[in-house]
Amino acid sequence: MGFMLQGFYSYYTKPPYFSGQYSAYMSYISALGTGSGAFWIVVLPLISCLVAGDSLAWDRRTGAIRFMLIRLSRKQYILGKILSSSMFTILFVSIGLILSFVIASILFPLKLPPWRFVNGTATFSVPGVPKSEIFLFPTFMHNFFFEHPFTYILLVTGIVVLSAVVWTNIALLASLFTTNIYLVMGIPWLIYIIVSFIMMIPLVGLPHYSPLVLSGPFMESGPGTGPSALSIPIFWMVVILLINTLSYIIFLRKGGEVLD
């Protein structure tokens, strides 16, 4: 919430697209990652890992895992750890973002700024410019944002929460190989930064599929070329399934190594 408030402040101090026409919806999207002063999107993996990402590593580090495995099977333990960490991350991040939007609706009007229609498309551009030069904001599901802004906010928030679960699960996976809490917290963030950097290199040509973009309001998604609304949640759910399956198999196969 602190990082979101910082994003709201940045939105307020820098002139919006229509001077003086502030919007709670626009400020929220800006603070999530599209604004120049938005830091939330950069620290997302670290914040999500701080919630419950060190849960397994802490059990191993303190020896509590031996105490729990007296009463639980290995399958029950690892499945319970994955589910509890994921659910707590969902709860924690969701509440933080919902409260952030409530604050945005108090600070700014709960309405969209005025816009114009160019070739039937709601846009912030001046009418009459070539279609190729129309600046669509937000670029991800642009028309849907103007038609149903509140639903759009819920959609984007849900996708951000899904991505937060991914980073928590990566921390759990790392916990099977190390009990160093700093590494468990830092590895997901390092992966996040490296993958985002690589996929945003022009030669790669897939900027709209980088984790940095997929976790926020998809600023890099060009109209007609960016991912669809359905493909983003599916992407994160597949990643969650793959990571958790890998954690489950490794935990069962490592056996005593995890306890030691």
Image (cartoon, rainbow, N blue to C red):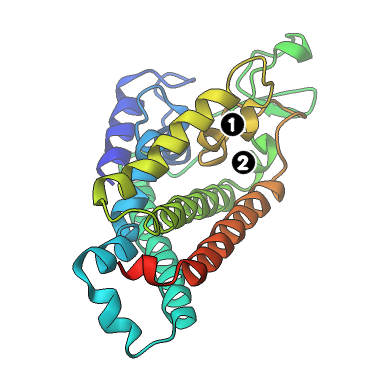
Disc 2 and disc 1 in contact, CB within 8 angstroms: yes
Classify mark 2: helix, strand or loop.
helix
User: Observer-nearest residue: 206 or 154?
Assistant: 206
Counting labels gives 2
**Mark number, residue 255:** none
Residue beneath label 1, please?
A: 138
Q: Is residue 44 visible?
A: no
Q: Quadrant of the C terminus?
A: bottom left
User: What residue appears at the point 38 percent right and 49 percent down from the top-left corner?
Assistant: 101
Q: Is residue 66 visible?
A: yes
Picture layout, residue 208 above or below residue 176: above
Residue beneath label 2, please?
A: 145
User: Reading the chain from its start, which is encountered first: label 2 or label 1?
Assistant: 1
Picture layout, residue 153 above or below residue 38: below
Amino acid type at circle 2 is Phe
The image position of residue 235, as x and y in percent, is 65, 49
